[in-house]
Image: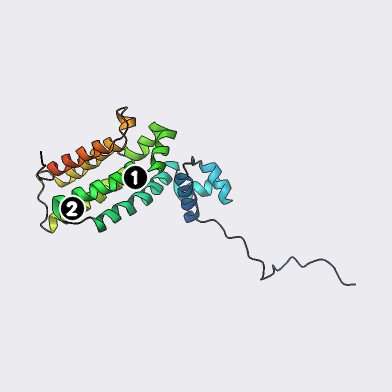
Amino acid sequence: MASNEMPLQKPSPDIARPARATPMDAFRRARRHWLKSERIHLASLAEELGIGRATLFRWVGNKDLLLGEVLWSLYEPLRQHALETTPGVGVDYVVGVYHSTNSTLLASQPLRNFIAQDPEYALRILTSASSTLHDRVVKANTRTLREQIANGHLRPPLNTDSLSYFMVRLAESCLYSDIIGGREPRQEELEDACKAVRIMLGGQVER
């Protein structure tokens, strides 16, 4: 007597197996949530990916580290675009890159929403000395300064590492002035910050 049951031992080659989630899937989904101004919860993210929380923690470390990766993935293309499209060399070039990058950040609605959701937490992720984002931004800025110095286009009166750190902290004070000083971030303050950077680089400012 013939059996009417379907054989279960061997899956049909025509039926696609569901793809297993990967660390990159976790990163992309977290980035998508951030851009939509949605809070990121690792437990919920693990459930969305169909994996255990222990697996997700092994992949991303913790929420702070994951957010640092997400924010860097959004910052670095802005910086690269500014590096590639800003004309000139030396002081004008460095100030131009600084202005372009930070003006874009100042107008970023997802960034403003992230700050509004939890200001103290956002400030820690964005500016803390232990933040992976802050450290990477300083190092990237230092590379740009050193390249201009090595090519003979820049002779700043300050130590390069100190100068880079001051530049980043100055930008942060403009971008996050609502958390730091209770003032709404303004493009006018960023323009003044660019003048200050020009002076720190050894350039001249028109009065």
Q: Position of residue 56 (x, y in %)?
A: 51, 48
Q: Residue at x 41, y 48 (%)?
A: 70
Q: Residue at x 21, y 42 (%)?
A: 167
Q: CA distance from mark 1 to mark 2?
A: 26 Å
Q: Is residue 83 above or below residue 98?
A: below
Q: Position of residue 42 (x, y in %)?
A: 51, 43
The answer to whether 144 appears left or right of 158 in the picture is right
Residue nearer the viewer, 102 or 201: 102
Can residue 52 be seen? no
Camera-side mark, 1 or 2: 2
Image quarter hosting the C terminus: top left
Can residue 195 be seen? yes
The answer to whether 170 appears left or right of 38 in the picture is left
Find residue 203 and report its image quarter. top left
Q: Position of residue 170 (x, y in %)?
A: 23, 38
State the residue position of label 1: 132
Q: Residues within 10 Å of mark 1 (few under 14, many from 20)?
A: many
Under tag 2, what secondary structure? helix
Under tag 1, what secondary structure? helix
